[in-house]
Structure formats: structure tokens, C-alpha cells
Amino acid sequence: MKKKIIMFGVFALIISLNTCLFAFDIPVEEKTEDKSLPDGWVIPVGNFMESTDFMDNGNIQNIGSCMWQGMSDVFACGDNVWCSFADGPWHIDISDISNPVFLSKVYTPFYTLKQGQIMGSNDILVEGDYAYIGDHEGVRIVNINNMELISTYSMRRAHTLYLRDNNLYVCDGTGFWVLDVSDPTEPDSIGFYEKPAAVGLDIVGDYAYISSTSGMILTILDISNPENPTFVSELEIIGVCPCGNQIIVENGYAYIAGGAGGCHIIDVNNPVNPVFKLSIDFDGSVTRIATINPQYIVISVSTPSSIEVIDVADPVNAFVAASYGGSGDLFVDGDRLFEVNSNSITIQNIQDPLNFVLEGSINVESYCSRGIQVSGNFAYIVDMGDWFNSGLNIVDISDPYNPFPRGNYSLGYPSFCTKLAVKDNYAYIPDIMNELLEIVDISNPDLPVYAGEYASSVEDLFVGDTYTYLLVGNSFQITDLRVPSNPTLISYILIGAEDGNEVFVDNGYAFIGDSEGEVWIVDVNESLNPQIVTSFNAAAEVTGIFVAGDFLYVVSQEQLRIVDISVINTPQIVGSYFDDDLSSYSNINVEGGYAYIANYIGGFLKIDVSNPNAPFREEFFQTAGWCRGLTYMNDYLYVSTDCSFQILNNKVVGIDDDFNPTYNETKCELSNYPNPFSHTTTISFSITGITQNIELSIYNLKGQKVKSLIDQNMEAGKHSVIWDGKNNSGNTVVQGIYFYQLNINNKLIAFRKMILLK
């Protein structure tokens, strides 16, 4: 037990160090220089990608998600707010500030493997019909009318964005980019200036002001010709932390959020000769900065957290005028200040900058998903909402395109849980911190409750029809947990000197992988007398194990081994797959000739194992955040990450086995107009063939049927029906996002999304 917790502590320290190092944005060295161009100008290394190019191919597609977390930035305009999560942007209506309405969202995965980070978006801005999002993959462009990702321009890590005259200016840690976005579906790089560690950006007139996290803290460029950014001047501040996280320029002065160095004020009235004036120091690190009005700026300070208002009426004698609790990214829209933390947005009225008035907040549940199991119409996910406080979340997946959380259960004490198993009406959750197995009654998915516990430090478990099989250190235990209030140990056997990591039970045999790479096969046909059949070495620590037919699939760091177990006492390794670009394989599922292997540092692999002797990689799907758990059922992949719960469709058609190609989405032409709408909308569709039973229904975000519009036999041809925004009881529904679904002969044919506004 001590070993496991120490290892986790070291792992967390490595993550922390990696994050700290990453904050300096060591630039990518690859570039193509052209000596005929001005100094500092290079042809940038970047590329435009269509929205599906982040995958090896497009067979696996995200169709539904929930439990999002990790807000990082916000853009507000009147009653509309767009916030960027690790998984992509959300559109929120705050016309009723006490009851914000989540209108729509779009999934924009980033390539986590580049940096091993779990953060996603860095900056978001909205203009016209488009949202521009900077993240680890580069720049994403989303059409906000239908919240569709339409393009991606790949670069290092887009920190700060500025849009003007169809040109998008970006700082990405390697330099200053200029993208032509006159056609948002095909952004094109037209200018670049190399500037290592460039992260902050503001533009005034013909000048771009860039702050950097190392080296010269301020760089000024002439951008009168966007295709040829030209060096004007630089400034180094001696004796302070050279960390320019963010910059704003107002009335001839640049204000830089300078990390541990405080808030720096620089006179830039003459861009050729910037002059440092002063730094205002704080106990914590200054991370974000915004302008309230010509007299005041506001900064965010971390550790300890505070929001500081600085009077800059006389910039050379600036002083702190007010201080408030809080921290995070900042955005000012008129008389409102939006303060963004990982799982909330606080909205303050700042009409009087010295007396903020809290107007409202937008809160999202804090999830840190780990293990996942799927049974029936529900997904069961272990999460650590805040570190070392584990719980169980139940998600309704009856409509895979619209999953939504149901009940949740907290262990209620400091705990550390990463796995679970589900059988019938119970979920079994190992808590390695407290060395017990907690049993939760899930018969009511809206109200899971404590049912019992088994005092043992369980590393992994497998629930069979009668018995539950546990790995406890180097002991393999067979238990009867069917009566949770009276758990019983049936028998046990030692499997060697090393701790067991993974267990899978199939056809009377248990397959166990340990921390040194040994795989043990145990005969459990006689539950009172389990017997070791044989063992063999799988190369390194076993992190995933699965049995399908006559083959055992063993995951060990960068390697997948396929083992023929048709003769149980003489297992034979018949195939291997090795990928030296990836690491930390875990959590394998095998179905239909494919192995799906989760990778902790982001995404999962789809390996073709139809020929066990020659497995090969068919696809890699990227996920936002570290991929913690994966399971497969009925052609859908269910994935839990640090950032969200996802449902992925693994079929090219994209519906299910009952999909009838005679009535595909193109032929049925399902649509509604207007969309969005405020009073009524007309839903139109067409059908072919002979008389059919037609069902057309409206559903809300919780997957509940709101209104049945049509349920009758209809002839072929074009049809339409008006929905007046009322439910089956005749009451007007609340504004928000709704789905309308067309079924023909009890088969799902198509569904669409619409937005009701009031």
C-alpha cells in the first residue's frame, strides 16, 4: 500500500514539474528559413487541417459527451457567453443571470501527446458567426450558428488570439503568427515572426505588443504590412521575474501580468523606445490582466488568490485601489467582469470598480473521471471530483447522442479510487487509500446508496455470476459479495512475490498480470480450491488484460501481446504490437476483431487483431485529457478522461445495427426552420416506399420525451409539422436546446438539434 501511494506522489510531482517547465514554452526548433526575408521573419511550420484530420481516419466519431470540466477562458457579448473547456467551447445564455442556460457545445479534441498536458483551450474570442479558439493543437474555428468545428490550423500551442480585418494574430510560444481567416474553413498563414516563449498579445494601431515568459519581456512589431511583421524594439526588465503571461496596452502604456514579478508598467508612447516605469509586487503570482476603463485595470493573483484593482490614472504612480477574493482568467464586457476558474464563472457588476457587486455565477460539477463500466442503459464512472475525494457518477446512456448525469455517490471521506466493477444492482469500488472495497446499491440510478464494504486493499477485481475475484497484494481471492452486508472470503491463493495488477476471469480460469510482467493462469472451477495452472512472462508490468475466445490479450507499457490459450496449460505468444511513440497503455477491450487500448497520456488505439499473428494499428483517437478508462458495448465506445465522459461511434454509418439504409439522413431530409426559433418552428421530412409507421418526437437535454408530434402511418412523400414549444401537457417549455427524432417502423432514422429562445 505504501509503495502505491508513494508512486502516485512521484507521478503527481512529475506532472507538476512538467507543467511548470511547459509554462516557459520552449520553442519548437523546426523551421524553414529564407535569408532573403527580413531578420526574424521565417516561413512558419504549421498546417491547415480539416476538422476530422486529428484522427488516423474518421471511422471513430464522438457522438455524445457530458461531465465536462476544465474551463479556461470566456468571451462575453451582451447576454451571450462562450466559454472554453478542455474539450471545446460552450455557448451560454445569461439573459436571466440567475438561471444561465447552456445552449450548445462542440467537441474539439487536442493532441495531448505533444505535451502530456490535461489542459485544453487557452483563449477564445467570438466575432460574427465564428468562434476562434486557441489550444494545444493550434487554432480551432467553430461556426457558432450550429456549433460545428469547421477548421483547425495546427501550430505549437495557441495562447493568445487577436482578430482584425480578417486577420487572426496568434502567439503560440514559438512566435507571432498572422492567419488569413477571410475563409474560416481554410485559414492560411500569411505572416510569422519568430519569438521564443511569446504568449501574450495586444494590438494597437500598426503595432503588435508581445509579452514572453522568458528572455525579453516585451517585443514590439510593426504590422502595417501583416504579411511582413517587422521588429521595432524590445525591452528587458532587469532584476524581476522575466515572465510576461499576458499584456494589455492602454493610452500609451503597456501593462504586463509578470508572474512572480508582479504587474509591470511600461511607457510605450514611443514604440521605438519603450521605457520601464515600475512593477507592483504581490505575495502571489500575477497571471491574468484586463482593462476596466481608462482609470482602472484588474489583475488576477494566484497563491494566495485575489483579484486586484489598480488605479492607473497616473501610470507612473499606479496603486492598488481595491482587492477582492478570487482568481482565474478575466474578461470585461461593459459593466461586467467575468472571472473564470476550472469549474465556474463568477459574474461581477463593476460599474463602480471599487465596489464589485456579485450578479451571478455559472457552475459546472467538478469531475476527474477514472474507471468506467457500462451496464444496460447506464455508464458508471468513478471520479475524484477534488483530489482524494472519490465518488461514483451514474450517466444515462439510453440515448447515446445525448448522455446526461443521473445520480452520484460520494465516499464521504478522503479516498483514492481508480477502478470499479458493476454487477446487477451493485457497484464495487476499491479504495486503495483506506484499504477497503466499498459496495454501493445502484438499483435506483438517481439515488445510489451505501450497501456494505469488504476490508481489503484491492488492486483490481472481476465480478462473475456468483463470485467476485479480487487481487490483494500478491493474493488472489475468491469472495462472495452477493449479500453486501455480509461479505465472505471463499478461498485464496498466492500468485508469487509481486503484487497483482490486472485480473480477468473467463470460462473457469482467472488470468492475472502482476507488477513485474508475469501472467498467471489460475483454475477457478472449484471455487474452494483454486489452483495455479501455469505462468509466463509478458515483458514488463502488466497494465491491461482481456480474454476473447481462445486468445488472451496482455498490455504491458508500449506493447500488446496476443497469447493463444486454446491449450490452457501451454499458452503460446503468437503476436505482438509495439509502438515506441506511445506509452502508458492500459485498460484493453477486444471486440469484433479489434483491440481498443486506452493510453493514459491521451487517447486510445484501435488495433486490428483479426489475424492474431500480425496485429496492426488501424486508428488512434485523441481525447481531451488523459484517457483513464474505456469500455465497449453494442458498437459504442465509452471513454472516461480527466475532462469528460465520451461516447464514440465505431460504425461508418453512425446509427446502430437496426439502421435501415433505405431511409438514411440524406433521403429523409429531416430539418426545421427557423432554428433557433422563439415561438414556432416547422419540422419537415420526406419518406420513400410504401405506407410506414412514423414517429416524430421532441426530447430535452435530459433525454426525456417532451412532445410527441406524430405517431401514425403515413404515405411516402414530403411532410411537415409545426411545434409551438409546448409539451404533451400543453405547457410552454423553457428555452434551451432540444432534439427532434424521426423513427420509421420503430427504427431510429435521424435526429436533429434545435434551439428555443425567448
Image (tube, helix red, strand yellow):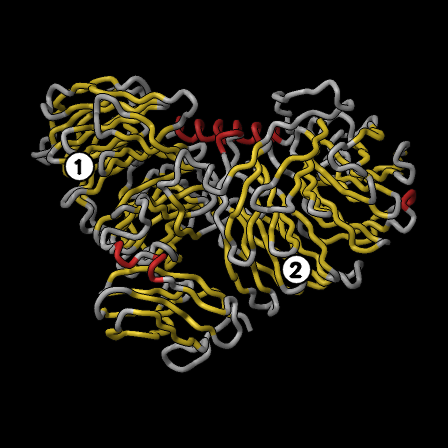
Q: Is residue 734 left or right of residue 219?
A: left
Q: Is residue 21 left or right of residue 414?
A: right
The reply to whether residue 541 is in sight is: no
In the image, residue 535 sits, relative to residue 17, either above or below, namely above
Query: Residue 545's quadrant in the figure?
Result: top left
As rendered, which of 35 and 169 lies closer to the eye? 35
Mark 2 Cα shell of 10 Å, populated few (<14), some (14-19), many (≥20): many
Residue type marked 2: Ile
> Where residue 102 appears, x then y in whole percent?
52, 61
> Where residue 279 appears, x then y in whole percent?
84, 37
Q: Is residue 660 left or right of residue 59?
A: left
Query: Residue 707's quadrant in the figure?
Result: bottom left
Task: Judge depth for marks 1 and 2 and give the one in front.
Answer: 2
Mark drawn on residue 347: 2
Q: Is residue 664 left or right of residue 480?
A: right
Query: Disc 1 or 2, which lies upstream in sequence?
Result: 2
Q: Quadrant of the N terminus?
A: top left
| Mark 2 residue element | strand
As rendered, which of 25 and 35 lies closer to the eye? 35
In the image, residue 528 sits, relative to residue 182, either above or below, namely above
Seen at 26% across and 51% down, the residue is 375
Seen at 42% across and 76% down, the residue is 722
| Mark 1 residue element | strand
Q: Label 1: which residue?
A: 478
